[in-house]
């Protein structure tokens, strides 16, 4: 069967795209490998109506609602190859292949954390976003371990949640102007690099510095380098943008990529990463893919 649309990635962005297409009664296949970016966190925050709910619970309720639509199929698996002709043929890791007239890429990102001792604490006491998890650690000693120039911006925000120290790691020195603004926000600046997080993981109690000092911190914010979770956009020849933490797929205002018939949404296609924004982008990508099918039929 040739699907109207294949959506690759079945998390916040992909399920939202699939919902619009299924409600338009189009034949949709949703392929998902089951590794959403926030799977390390026990609770997802800030998503209206779902604040504090476990990420997997939000997504499984989404899948349950989508499964009521008869024109949508789910396929658990990984899309590893894509070929474009008149249609798109997507090759799967298990050797199978599926075909669709349009493609929505909602494949998300992978985080490369700056220190090995962060991985087992990721999503619990090592965090990427104060809006998502700052409220839960309010009032505690907070650290920003700098990983790119955006870390200074993160350190300027954080005092609204708790007393903050910026660790420059000896690499991300604030300019004079930034140092002035950090001082006005009462942010301490430490230049000796953090080498290890201490405490009973996944919790953090303190940070060990390269000179042996131990500094108290119960939550560590960092902006890891990000990379594409899937190479499909690259295989198709989509253009990319440089984001604050890594590359993302270039899309226009209605989520069209630079390749005709290919749409992209969510963290993979924007520089700001948040479940609500990913979901909203997925809605737009689904609607755009539907409109492009309608326009093609109306022009035939
Ligand atoms: C630790 C952590 C905690 C977070 N907490 C919050 C929070 O509290 N609130 C909030 O709003 N945001 C939070 N975020 C951000 C949020 O997780 C992302 O913005 C959101 O998950 C992006 O949704 P997405 O659908 O674009 O991608 P993802 O959720 O990453 O989903 C991508 C999906 O595509 C699948 N996939 C990838 N490649 C393929 C392939 N080739 N074939 C098939 N499937 C594929 C993946 O397995 C995955 O299921 C958090 C992020 C992190 C890292």
Image (cartoon, helix red, strand yellow):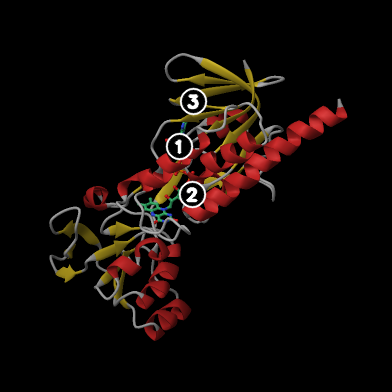
Mark 2 falls on what kind of element? loop
**Where is residue 154 shown, x and y percent of the image?**
41, 68
Q: In the depicted view, which residue is nearer to us: 27 or 247?
A: 27
Quadrant field for ligand 1: top left
Q: CA distance from mark 2 to mark 3?
A: 22 Å
Give the vertical position of 211 relative to 35 (above or below).
Answer: below
Residue 183 drawn at (x, y percent)? 37, 83
Which corner quadrant holds the N terminus? Answer: top right
Which residue is the site of mark 1?
A: 64
Q: Position of residue 208 (x, y in %)?
A: 16, 63
Q: Residue at x 37, y 72 (%)?
A: 158
Tell me if 202 is positioned left or right of 7 in this view.
left
Judged by depth in the image, the label closer to the viewer, 2 or 1, is 1
Q: Quadrant of residue 4?
A: top right
Q: Going 68% across and 34% down the picture, which residue do you hit?
A: 259
Q: Secondary structure at mark 1?
A: helix
Q: Residue furthest bottom?
A: 184
Residue bearing the label numbered 3: 79
Q: Which residue is mark 2?
A: 246
């Amino acid at each position: 069967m040739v699907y109207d649309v294949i959506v690759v990635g079945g998390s916040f962005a992909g399920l939202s795209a699939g919902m619009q297409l299924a409600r338009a009664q189009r034949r949709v296949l949703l392929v998902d490998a089951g590794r959403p970016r926030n799977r390390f966190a026990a609770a997802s925050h800030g998503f209206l109506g779902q604040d504090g709910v476990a990420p997997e619970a939000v997504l499984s309720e989404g899948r349950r609602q989508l499964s009521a639509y008869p024109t949508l199929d789910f396929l658990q698996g990984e899309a590893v190859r894509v070929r474009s002709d008149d249609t798109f043929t997507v090759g799967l890791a298990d050797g199978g292949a599926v075909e669709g007239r349009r493609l929505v890429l909602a494949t998300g990102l992978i985080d490369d954390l700056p220190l090995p001792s962060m991985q087992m604490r990721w999503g619990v006491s090592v965090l990427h976003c104060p809006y998502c998890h700052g409220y839960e650690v309010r009032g505690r000693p907070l650290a920003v371990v700098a990983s790119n120039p955006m870390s200074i911006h993160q350190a300027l925000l954080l005092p609204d949640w708790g007393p903050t120290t910026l660790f420059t790691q000896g690499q991300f020195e604030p300019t004079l102007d930034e140092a002035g603004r950090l001082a006005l926000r009462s942010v301490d600046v430490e230049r000796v690099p953090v080498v290890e997080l201490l405490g009973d993981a996944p919790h953090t109690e303190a940070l060990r510095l390269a000179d042996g000092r131990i500094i108290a911190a119960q939550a560590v914010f960092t902006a890891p380098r990000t990379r594409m979770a899937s190479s499909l956009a690259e295989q198709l020849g989509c253009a990319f943008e440089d984001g604050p933490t890594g590359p993302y797929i270039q899309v226009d205002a209605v989520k069209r990529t630079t390749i005709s018939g290919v749409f992209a949404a969510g963290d993979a296609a924007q520089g700001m990463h948040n479940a609500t924004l990913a979901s909203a982008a997925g809605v737009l990508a689904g609607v755009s893919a539907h409109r492009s099918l309608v326009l093609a039929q109306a022009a035939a």
